[in-house]
Image: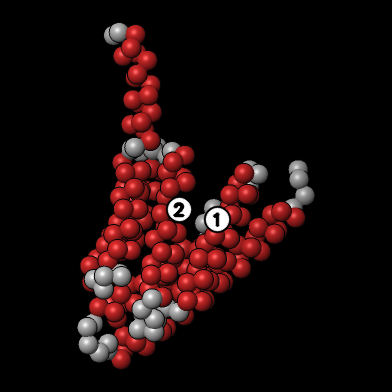
Amino acid sequence: MSETTSKRAPRSLSVTRILNVPNQITIARLVLSMVVFVLIPLAQYWSALAFFDVAAGTDWLDGYLARKYNLVTRLGRILDPFVDKFLICGVFIFLVADYPKSGIAAWMAVVVVTRELLVTVMRSFLEGEGIDFSAKTAGKVKMVFQCGAVIISLMALGFASQTPSWMNWLLTIVVWLAVGSTIYSGAAYIWQAIRMMMRPAD
């Protein structure tokens, strides 16, 4: 092996590890998110729904593969939660333009975006201090309701004529569950962060 090849090998291995399968899935989810953002303003709601389902439905896959096959990287730890927030916050913002039929008002999108930004800042600070601030059950439940709200909203918008009355009722219920769980989980994280910061150092 030549000296040049020997010098290039570590770089090649590093790039291969960074662009492993879990990170490729995460990047693909990022691209799918942007496709959804293009389709909603074009009123292609059913197509947007299909792409959103794939992007949100594969949320667990990249993390599962990374942990199972020891492929966790710094890029993945940063990119995976970023894509989750990018997708949810972005879709909520775009759906505001179709209110009231979308069921998502501007203040609701503000609540979602504010919560995600606040929790991200707190997690970054606390984990920088060596304190575990991983996702809790309330945060996972919140994500389920948020995704449900987006799915039903896109379905309601997908009906060119009159939206079925039962869907309007379902949309209202799920959207409020999404907003309520967002506020609750945000408050729970804030309280947890306060307790951790007030805890005396060992």
Which quadrant is home to the C terminus? top right
Q: What colouring method underlies this structural image?
A: secondary structure
Q: Which residue is mark 1?
A: 120
Q: Which residue is mark 2?
A: 81
Instruction: Kindly tell me whether residue 154 is visible in this rendering.
Output: yes
Sequence-wise, which precedes: disc 1 or disc 2? Answer: 2
x 47%, y 39%: residue: 74
| Label placed on residue 76 | none
Q: Residues within 10 Å of mark 2 (few under 14, many from 20)?
A: few
Relative to 197, does residue 152 appear above or below in the rendering?
below
Q: Nearer the viewer, residue 179 or 104?
A: 104
Q: Quadrant of residue 114?
A: bottom right
x 30%, y 56%: residue: 32
Relative to 1, 104 lies left or right: right
Instruction: Kindly tell me whether residue 57 is visible in this rendering.
Output: no
Where disc 1 sits, the SS reads helix
Please report contact status of discs 1 and 2: CB closer than 8 Å, yes or no.
Answer: yes
